[in-house]
């Protein structure tokens, strides 16, 4: 009895294992499997495979089915049946419309698809109509003639590959090398013409160097495309083609990334030349920022493209990256604020590189505007890093945008200075300002403005032409020295905080007060002498610091 039960189970298992594959067109997966299965060497039944072609006679349908299979094999398009939907009523979004259609390889060969007609799935009418063109593109006219001229010995196999395929592969690589050399020169010549047309100027040496580097990956792209077109003609098996074309597609993607990276360098080099010709120094800071931003964009898109070639669902990755990016943005709000602040600074341009600014408690010269912060160097050479988010909200006093440097001070004279000498001193200072080469001679004020605690106040308001901090100090030095010489010649003394005690004068003692010479002739002589010395005085050499 046990033997009978065992025999019954074995026969049931054997019958199930030997159950033949039938033509099934009920869903996309079954239809494609029917087509591929019945064109395999160990299950070759082209009439059944032709059932996946709708509306054609059997002979023509068989021809179309075989060509579709050869096109897929020739391009190394391996079908992963686990990814194909098996729902009878499957609908895919093509454009903005849901349709009963499934594309086998949306990226590499979107022309091949299956669609639902009635209750069954067949290769789409678009695929059937262009299959002859696809076949001729993959296997050009010379492929068939090549088969006739290959001797019998050429079909001998070594490691599963025919001898003529080895020879043809070597010839293909040699031709590809010559294609690379030729197109490298052509690409460089075309790029030079484009660069001349864009810049309208003589080529820069650095730009030419980058253009040469850009011409190389472009010629490599042409070479890879040449191999991509010709390699199916060698008629390797699907397993070989699968890995070869995967390598070709990866190489093509990497070369495209390289091309765009070099293109970014060329654009940034040209942009750098343009910014160097402008008066504003702030736009020079855009070069490294834009370079980093564009490089990051190219690398990210290239990464997603490579992942797509390995069969990774980039839509899911993008969705995950979007959610992760949102979480990251929420966790790093300060960085986002600083980026927005950077954009605001470059749009508003409240200062330039080198301007002397006051922002809050920080005063100094702007050295660099970065992606996140701005670097300011104070007068004592201390470096301040101000976040751009805060800097964009501050009240900025930009001394670098002034037309002139204003200098205002009070000259304190002793209370016992005679009015004649005060008037002479004021007129002398005015004439010195007029003769000063670094002052604005049509806009100044020198007036007796009031009585201080210890001095008679003479207000001096003057404007220096140079905006550089070092030049301003040099100009002040020359002006101050001329005023001191004027006071010495006139006998005018400057006051200092003091207390005067009035004591009774004894007959034997002379007066302690200074003696002033108010002779008008003497005053005029002193003024002329001081002004003559001032005109002939050569200012000291000075290397002005940038503001």
Image: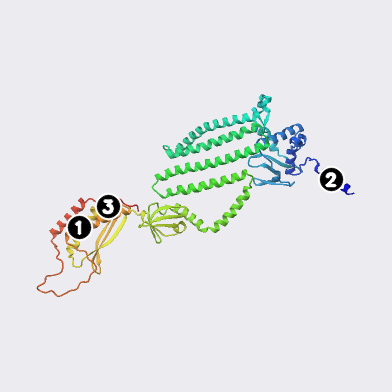
In this view, the residue farthest toward the bottom is 504
Q: Is residue 47 left or right of residue 207?
A: right
Identify residue for label 2.
10
For marks 3 and 2, give the one nearer the viewer.
Answer: 2
Is residue 522 visible from the viewing direction of this image? yes
Identify residue for label 1.
485
Identify residue for label 3.
438
Badges 1 and 2: C-beta atoms under 8 Å apart?
no
Above or below — where is 125 with respect to 287?
above
Q: Which callout, 1 or 2, points at the residue further toward the start of the chain? A: 2
Circle 2 Cα neighbour tier, 10 Å, few/some/many (<14 / 14–19 / ≥20): few
Name the quadrant containing residue 224: top right
> Which secondary structure lies at badge 1?
helix
Could you give the CA–CA distance between mark 3 and mark 1, rounded to whole angstroms? 19 Å
Residue in front for this viewpoint, 100 or 71 = 71
In the image, what residue occupies the spot 55% across and 56% down?
A: 329
For marks 3 and 1, give the one nearer the viewer.
Answer: 1
Percent x, y of residue 165: 64, 30
Residue in front for this viewpoint, 103 or 159 = 159
Percent x, y of residue 374: 43, 55
Q: Which callout, 3 or 2, points at the residue further toward the start of the chain? A: 2
> Which secondary structure lies at badge 2?
helix
Percent x, y of residue 72: 68, 37
Q: Which callout, 3 or 1, points at the residue further toward the start of the chain? A: 3
Is residue 140 visible from the viewing direction of this image? no
């Amino acid at each position: 009895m046990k033997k009978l039960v065992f025999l019954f189970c074995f026969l049931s298992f054997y019958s199930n294992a030997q159950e033949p594959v039938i033509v099934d067109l009920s869903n996309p997966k079954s239809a494609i499997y029917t087509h591929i299965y019945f064109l395999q060497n160990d299950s070759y039944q082209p009439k059944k495979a032709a059932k996946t072609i709708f509306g054609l006679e059997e002979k023509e349908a068989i021809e179309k089915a075989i060509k579709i299979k050869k096109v897929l094999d020739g391009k190394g398009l391996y079908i992963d049946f686990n990814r194909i939907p098996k729902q009878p009523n499957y609908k895919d979004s093509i454009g903005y419309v849901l349709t009963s259609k499934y594309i086998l390889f949306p990226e590499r060969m979107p022309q091949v698809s299956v669609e639902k007609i009635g209750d069954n799935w067949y290769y789409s009418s678009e695929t059937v109509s262009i299959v002859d063109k696809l076949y001729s593109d993959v296997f050009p006219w010379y492929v068939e003639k090549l088969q006739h001229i290959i001797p019998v010995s050429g079909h001998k196999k070594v490691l599963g590959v025919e001898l003529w395929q080895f020879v043809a592969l070597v010839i293909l690589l040699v031709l590809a090398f010559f294609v690379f050399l030729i197109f490298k020169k052509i690409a460089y010549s075309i790029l030079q013409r484009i660069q001349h047309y864009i810049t309208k100027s003589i080529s820069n040496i650095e730009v030419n160097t980058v253009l040469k580097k850009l011409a190389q990956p472009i010629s490599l792209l042409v070479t890879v495309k040449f191999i991509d077109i010709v390699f199916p003609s060698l008629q390797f098996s699907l397993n070989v083609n699968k890995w070869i074309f995967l390598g070709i597609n990866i190489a093509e993607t990497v070369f495209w990334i390289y091309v765009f990276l070099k293109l970014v360098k060329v654009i940034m080099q040209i942009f750098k030349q343009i910014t160097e010709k402008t008066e504003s120094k702030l736009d020079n800071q855009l070069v490294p920022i834009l370079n980093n931003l564009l490089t990051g964009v190219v690398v990210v898109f290239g990464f997603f493209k490579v992942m797509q070639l390995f069969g990774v669902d980039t839509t899911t990755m993008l969705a995950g990256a979007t959610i992760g990016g949102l979480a990251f943005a929420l966790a790093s709000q300060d960085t986002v604020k600083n980026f927005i602040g950077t954009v605001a600074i470059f749009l508003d341009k409240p200062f330039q590189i080198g301007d002397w600014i006051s922002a809050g408690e920080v005063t100094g010269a702007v050295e660099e505007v970065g992606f996140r912060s701005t670097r300011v160097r104070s007068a004592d050479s201390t470096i301040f890093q101000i976040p751009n988010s805060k800097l964009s909200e501050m009240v900025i006093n930009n001394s670098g945008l002034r037309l002139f440097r204003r200098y205002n001070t009070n000259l304190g004279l002793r209370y016992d200075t005679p009015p004649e000498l005060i008037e002479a001193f004021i007129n002398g200072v005015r004439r010195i300002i007029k003769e000063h080469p670094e002052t604005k001679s049509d806009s100044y004020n020198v007036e007796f403005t009031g009585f201080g605690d210890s001095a008679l106040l003479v207000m001096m308001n003057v404007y220096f032409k140079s905006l550089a901090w070092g030049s301003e100090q040099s100009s002040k030095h020359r002006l101050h020295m001329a005023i001191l010489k004027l006071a010495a010649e006139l006998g005018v003394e400057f006051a200092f905080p003091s207390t005067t005690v009035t004591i009774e004068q004894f007959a034997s003692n002379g007066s302690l007060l200074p003696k002033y010479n108010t002779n008008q002739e003497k005053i005029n002589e002193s003024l002329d002498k001081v002004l003559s010395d001032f005109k002939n005085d050569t200012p000291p050499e000075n290397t002005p610091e940038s503001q």
